[in-house]
Amino acid sequence: MLTKRIIPCLDIKDGRTVKGINFEQIRDAGDPVELATIYAKEGADELVFLDITATNEKRKTLSELVNKIAHHINIPFTVGGGINSVEDVQVLLKNGADKISVNTAAFKKPDLINELALAFGSQCVVLAIDTKQEVDGNWYVYLNGGKVKTNTLCFDWAREAVDRGAGEILLTSMNNDGTKKGFALDITKQLSVSLPVPIIASGGAGNKEDFAAVFQEAQADAALAASIFHFKELSVPELKKYLSEQQIPVRL
Amino acid sequence: MKTVIIQYNAGNIQSVLYALERIGCTADVTDNPEQIIQADKVIFPGVGEASTAMSYLKNRNLDQVIVNLKQPVLGICLGMQLMCRHSEENNTECLGIFNEKVSKFTPVEGVNKIPQVGWNTIENLKTPIFNGIKESAFCYYVHSYYASIGNDTIATTQYGIRYSAALHRNNFYGVQFHPEKSAETGEQILKNFIAL
């Protein structure tokens, strides 16, 4: 039986892991390869590396890091942050990344998704969406790490991206991110039941019950979290044991 | 002991190379027929689309090279599918090493996501390639097409329907999952192949 995936996310700045709370108080958290290896050993199903510097000068640092990660870890991993072109993706895949995630650049130039799917296959194209529910009750797409609002509905953009060849959706709710009060169940469920690709829920994980809810109620295919794992509030084995007890299929 | 990975226009070659390094095996990546024929072990990887991959192989005469290999050969994912008789993916005639045919998943109740992405269990394990692997061990899959169950089936997986997780005929092996991304289970399977 296909299992639900638990995906720790590592933020990378200048080739190092950083930890922060709501992007405040960012501090060095060590070697990403070491941390990734620990997560892989603990039973994480995949990893996501998000380069939060992602400037052109630092891109070489990132591809070298990706190469090092690919040598060391024996589970799939996705790399995202500042990806703008087929060439950007080529470098990351050649260095051993399994998938890449695109966000703002794809929204600004949707053909990028078609180009990437054609060149590398949908299986390696993850569309990341940052979304926020406004007072009108609708979920809108935000760009540039949540700084820029658009008038496009999250669901419309997700559907268009899937039609263009995105193979998975990484959905982050800005309302929930950093709150530790649980994932955004309604928008996650709307996407998961309507779209034919896996949905990775992100933002708001505060305890193991939140993961159970996003899998059972919102029917997410995978759940991503960062701080809850980094700050050791919850370990991957502990989480998976709990989910298994709740009859949620996980890899043990 | 010489292991080669067949170089062609399909992804995941680096991942396979690195996974072999992790189990202490060096390999060359090549599309040179002589080098492939002389190797002790041949790995035929692949992520991509069937008809494009088959034309690429045919244009370089690699299709004939592969079917005539006598040493152990391991096809991975698309590599395994190309070793089957026929693929529904753009109606492609494949290498015909395995008698099974490759079809696209159709959505059924409870299984509406295609491709299948993630960790699933392997059952009904046969042949030494699964030495030391427990029934229902987890492997990592990414695929939209699957091989049917037939005489060559040496492992099965359930995703909506039950299909071939692995195939074997003579010196040829194929796995639908990605051993290079399947943690310790995958590493053991690669070790078993190298030890054949």
Image (cartoon, coloured by chain):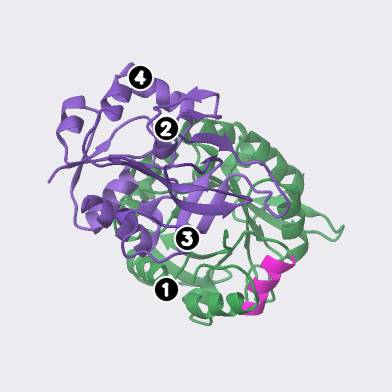
Q: Which residue is mark 2?
A: B82
- In terms of secondary structure, what is the magenta stretch mainly? helix
Tag 1 secondary structure: helix
Q: Which residue is mark 1?
A: A42
Q: Residues within 10 Å of mark 1 (few under 14, many from 20)?
A: some
Q: Are dots 1 and 2 in contact, CB under 8 Å?
A: no
Q: Residue B183: give x, y in percent of width and height.
A: 38, 62
Q: Is residue B26 visible?
A: yes
Give the CA distance from mark 3 to mark 4. Answer: 35 Å
> Is A213 one of the magenta-colored residues?
yes
Q: Chain of mark 1?
A: A
The three-letter amino acid code for the residue at tag 1 is Glu
Counting residues from the N terminus, which is met first, the one under dot 2 or under dot 4? 4
Please tell me if label 2 and label 4 are on a single chain.
yes
Q: Are dots 1 and 4 in contact, CB under 8 Å?
A: no
Which tint is chain B? purple
Q: Chain of mark 4?
A: B
Residue A118 relative to residue B73: left or right: right
Q: Residue B19: give x, y in percent of width and height.
A: 29, 53
Q: Residue A134: give x, y in percent of width and height.
A: 81, 59
> Is B165 one of the magenta-colored residues?
no
Tag 2 secondary structure: helix
Q: Residues within 10 Å of mark 3 (few under 14, many from 20)?
A: many
Give the CA distance from mark 1 to mark 4. Answer: 44 Å
Closer to the eye: label 3 or 2: 2
Q: Which residue is mark 4?
A: B58
Q: Quadrant of the N terminus of chain A?
A: bottom right
- Up-down relation of residue A232 to residue B146 (above or below): below
In this rendered view, identify the residue nearer to me: B93 or A37: B93
Q: Residue A129: give x, y in percent of width and height.
A: 64, 51
